[in-house]
Amino acid sequence: MGENELPPLNAIRAFEAAARRGSFVEAANDLHVTHWAIGKQIRHLEDWLGVALFERRTRGVALTDHGADLLADVSAALVRLTSATARLRGPQPARRVSGTVRVNALSSFALRWLLPRLARFQDAYPGIEVKMSTTSRKLRYVGAAFDIGIRTGVERGSGFRCETLMPDRQLPVCSPAILRERPVETAHDLRRHVLLHSTTTRSAWPNWLAAAGVAGLTPARHIELDHVYLQLQAAVDGLGVALGSLHLIEADIAAGRLVCPIAAPELRAGDYQLIISDDRLRDPAIKAFRSWILAAASEPLPGIDPPFRQNRPAAPPRGRTRSNVRRGD
C-alpha cells in the first residue's frame, strides 16, 4: 500500500453510513444497496487497513476504537467535500427548495446550539420555513406535531427514524473568576466549590465524580436548577461549577466566559439523536435540513477542539496531588 494511495472510496461511503446508523441493514437502506453489499465493502476496507472497524453484535454493530477514529476523519472530510462541491454548484439549487420544517428540540439544545446556527440555514435555504418548538417529552407522546426531533438517547418506536447527530461530551465548567481564589487542579479541589445541578441531569455529577475517582467527594454546597440552560448560565455568572455539554458551551468557552479547569475524564451521556418522521423522509425541505444539521454537527468545536485549558487562570504555587482520574433538556 503506497503512502498516498487513496482508500477504496465505495467502502469509505459504506463505512460512514454503517457507522452513522449503527447498522449494516440501515446503511444498506440509505445507500439503496443490499445488506450483503455493505458487509462486503466493510470487510474490504478492514482488509485494506489491516484493522477491525466494527464489533459485530446480535443487534447492529458498534465501532471499535480504530473505527471511531476513522469516522471522525471521514466525517470531517465529507463535510469539506460537500462544502467544496456546493460552492461550485452555486446557491440556486438550494434556493429552489421550499416548504416547512417543524423542529421539536430540547430547550437547552435549541437555545444554546441550534438557534445560534439557524441563520446559516435560512441564508442557504430562504424558501424553507423552520417552525421551532421545545419539550423534553418522548417524541412518541408529541404525536404528529413534528417533522424532525432532537433528543438525547436513542428513541425507539414506529413511524420515525433515529440517527446519531453528535456525541454529548461533558466536563466540569465554571467562570474563570471563581478559580482565582479557589483554583482547581484535580477533581479533589471541587470540594471547595459549589456544584450546580439541573433537575433533568441529577445523575451527571455523581457519575462524573465516580469516573474521576472521587465518588465520595462532598462539595461546599449543591445548587439545583430546573433546566440545563439555567445551570449553565449560573456557571457563567460565577455561582459554581456545572457539568457542561461541550457542544452547548462552545461560544462561552471561545469568549472566555467559561473554562474547563479539568480536562478529563469526559463524561459521555446519551448522544444527541436526530429523529425524523417516516412519512416526511423524502420531503425536499426535510432532506435539506437533515443534510445541513448533520454537517453543522460534525464541525470541530472552536476553542474546545484543540484543547482549551489555556483559558484557565494561573494558580498560585502550591503542593499538588495527582488523581487517577454519563441527561435531559
Image (cartoon, rainbow, N blue to C red):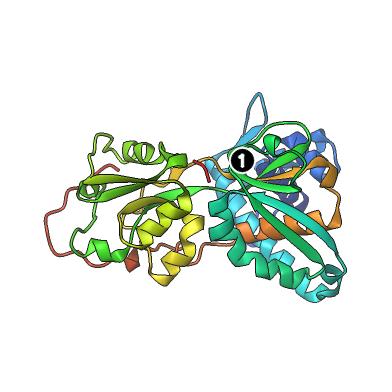
- Compared with 184, 202 (above or below) is above
Residue displayed at 21% across by 46% down: 220
Q: Nearer the viewer, residue 43 or 246?
A: 246
> Which amino acid, by three-letter code, is at mark 1?
Leu
Q: Percent x, y for residue 92?
A: 85, 74
Task: Tell me which residue sits at (68%, 47%) in the image.
Answer: 149
- Looking at the picture, how far across and down is residue 150, in whole percent? 64, 47
187 left or right of 309 in image: left
Task: Decide which of 277, 214 is in the foreground and name it.
Answer: 277
Is residue 84 in sight in this rendering? no
* Nearer-the-camera pick, 115 or 209: 115
Question: Which picture quadrant has residue 197?
Answer: top left
Determine whether 201 is above or below 181 in the image.
Answer: above
Position of 260 with respect to 146 (left or right) is: left
- Residue 39 appears at what percent x and percent y? 75, 36
Residue of label 1: 53
Does residue 263 sit above or below 273 in this rendering? Answer: below
Q: Residue at x 74, y 58 (%)?
A: 289
Q: Quadrant of residue 124?
A: bottom right
Q: Secondary structure at mark 1?
A: loop
Number of callouts in the render? 1
